Image (cartoon, rainbow, N blue to C red):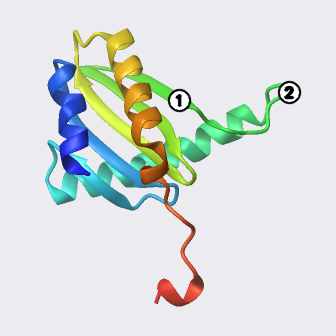
Amino acid sequence: MDWLLKDLAVTVPRTRHIVLLSADGLCMAQWGADKDVADRLAAASSGLKSLAQSVAAELPHSEGGVRMVVLEVDGGFFYLMAAAANSYLAVTADEGVDAGLMSQRMRDLVIRIGDHLASPPRAPEQAR
């Protein structure tokens, strides 16, 4: 899976980190980040997804789903996109990234390999 994430990074200049995570914040694949950074990004992304769901629930006609979250911060951008059932794609990028290209390439990746990105819910006996 990591090579697919690398393809996204190579085609969008200024990409720093890419993390594929489960809805509960577990890192499933990464590019450009060591394990500690990837785990922190996955956990933070899960929290942001939960906050975005709370906001979405306040909108008329919303079912509370989150498709994409974009944050512009000092030094760059953070993107979080729903990838498949119970999984999300998180990307950090430096200032000057082409925001439209990043969104398009993330969406292309999700469409192209979406079924392979699904993270089935873990059974209680697997969590031990």
Question: Does residue 109 appear to the left or right of 4 in the view shown?
Answer: right
Mark 1 residue element: strand
Say which of 117 and 76 sits in front. 117
Amino acid type at mark 2: His
Q: Residue at x 68, y 39 (%)?
A: 65
As drawn, 11 above or below 101: below
Distance from disc 2 to disc 1, alpha carbons, whole Å, reads 17 Å
Question: Does residue 92 appear to the left or right of 16 in the view shown?
Answer: right
* Circle number at residue 84: none
* Circle number at residue 61: 2
Q: Residue at x 60, y 41 (%)?
A: 51
Considering only order in the chain, which callout, 1 or 2, is on the residue closer to the N terminus? 2
One can see residue 16 in this view:
no
Residue, disc 1? 68
Q: Residue at x 19, y 29 (%)?
A: 9
As drawn, 25 above or below 5: below
Q: Residue at x 73, y 39 (%)?
A: 64
Where does residue 93 sit, x and y in percent of width and height? 24, 25
Outermost residue on the right side: it is 60
Where does residue 39 sit, x and y in percent of width and height? 29, 57
Quarter of the figure with residue 123: bottom right
Say which of 47 and 19 sits in front. 19
Question: Does residue 88 appear to the left or right of 30 in the view shown?
Answer: right
Amino acid type at mark 1: Met
